[in-house]
Each structure stands twice: as C-alpha cells, then as structure tokens.
Amino acid sequence: MPAETDSREMSFLEHLEELRWRLVKSAASILLFSIVAYFFTDHILNFLTRDIGAVYFNAPTEAFSVRIKLSIITGLLAALPVVFWQIWQFVVPGLYRNEARLVIPVVILATIAFVGGAAFCFFLVLPVGMQFLLGFGTEKIQPLISVGRYISFVSWMCLGFGAVFELPIVSFFLGRIGLIDSGMLRRGRRYAVVGILVVAAAITPSPDVFSQLMLAGPLYILYELSIVIVRMTGRRG
C-alpha cells in the first residue's frame, strides 16, 4: 500500500481558500518581476527585433502598450519557478509521500522545459520562419512591420512552445503516480494527432498554416518522447 498523505483532509472551502492564496502569491511574483522588467524594455525590444531591423507603431498608444506587454511577459518568465512551486504545493496535499517527493525535481524540470521551449522557438524556429515569410516580399511589396503585431507574434509563439515543451514533464509525473501508461499513450496516438493540430491552431497568433505546422511538428515529437519517458519511468504494476 502507498504511504499515507502528509496533510489532513481539507474541506472544499479550504481548498478554494488555498487555491486563492496560491494564485495571489503567483500574481504578486509576476507583478514584482514585471515592474523590474519595465526598466529594461528598451534592451529587450532591441534584442527581439535584432534580426528584422526597424519596426513601427501605428497608433499613439502602441509603443507604450508594447512596453507593458513585454514587461508582463518577461515578468511571467522570471516568475516561473515561483508559479510552478505554488501550483505543485497546491497539488501536494492530495499526493502520497512517495509522490510528493517528486515535487521539487518536477518544478525544476518544468521551469527548464518551459524556458528551453521558448528558447528553441526564438533561436531556431522563428529565424527560419521569419526568413521564409518575409521571403514572399518583392521590390514592390516591402514589409512595414507593426511593433505590436510583431511582439504579439513572437510572444505567442515562444509561450506556446514553452507550454508544449511541458508535455514530457507532465507525462513523467502522471506516469509516476500511475494515472497514465505508455500503452494508453500509444493507443491514443491517432487522437493525439488531431488534438495536436487543434492546439497548434489555437495557440498560434495568426491563422496561417505555416505557423501552425511549426508548432505541431515539435509537439508531435514531444508526444512520442513522452511515450518513451512513461515506458521507462512509469509505475510498474
């Protein structure tokens, strides 16, 4: 029999109160990091646009709103360890002791996976994608890229890749506690392909098929990797 859980049974209202405080702490950490990040938005913007040259704003408030958006996104990325920790601490009371021991390594791996996914998108996928998309320009059709739309495109793509790179970590955790197994994932492969295409269409900021395929391809590879991870590390029997 698994070891007993460490905490007493909580009522529904106590769970809601616990969730509320976890969300407050997560939001506070994001806000704090966002305020700090605001003072570095010039450097962040220069870094994000280094491969495409000048960008333009088309409304009086656009340049300011882009700085706010960049601050929030940077604050979210910086606060990821805190956010993941709060999520797992909310989950821990419902776990057995041997399962709760996974929390710290899962938080660390989840943070690394998210940042790794965002970096993979920014340094590998986006340069190729932007070169491909801008390559359709001609002498008569020149790009005039809005800073707001460009930052939205880059942000959604990087956040989307960061989120989908969590799939192996989530699969590892669910496999360890016995909720899924590799056979279940293999049998669900055909449904996973449909789900992956739906997720890619929902996450990508623009409706073009190219952006969706850029996300769907790595996501399917991660699904196959998850099958291997669950087969190797999942609960036996």
Image (cartoon, rainbow, N blue to C red):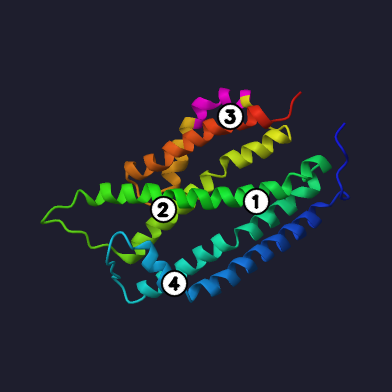
Residue tagged 3: 227
Q: Residues within 10 Å of mark 3 (few under 14, many from 20)?
A: many
Q: Residues within 10 Å of mark 1 (few under 14, many from 20)?
A: some
Compared to residue 206, the image places residue 35 above or below, namely below
Q: Residues within 10 Å of mark 4 (few under 14, many from 20)?
A: some
Task: Tell me the CA gap for discs 3 and 2.
Answer: 26 Å
- Quadrant position of the N terminus in the picture: top right
Q: Secondary structure at mark 2?
A: helix
Residue 23 visible, this orientation: yes
Q: Nearer the viewer, residue 195 or 1?
A: 1
**Residue 41's mark?**
4
Q: Secondary structure at mark 3?
A: helix
Q: Secondary structure at mark 1?
A: helix
Residue 181 visible, this orientation: no
Q: Earlier in the sequence, mark 2 or mark 1?
A: 1
Does the magenta-highlighted stretch encompass residue 45? no
Q: Residue at x 54, y 66 (%)?
A: 75
Q: Earlier in the sequence, mark 3 or mark 2?
A: 2
Residue tagged 1: 108
Compared to residue 150, the image places residue 229 above or below, namely above
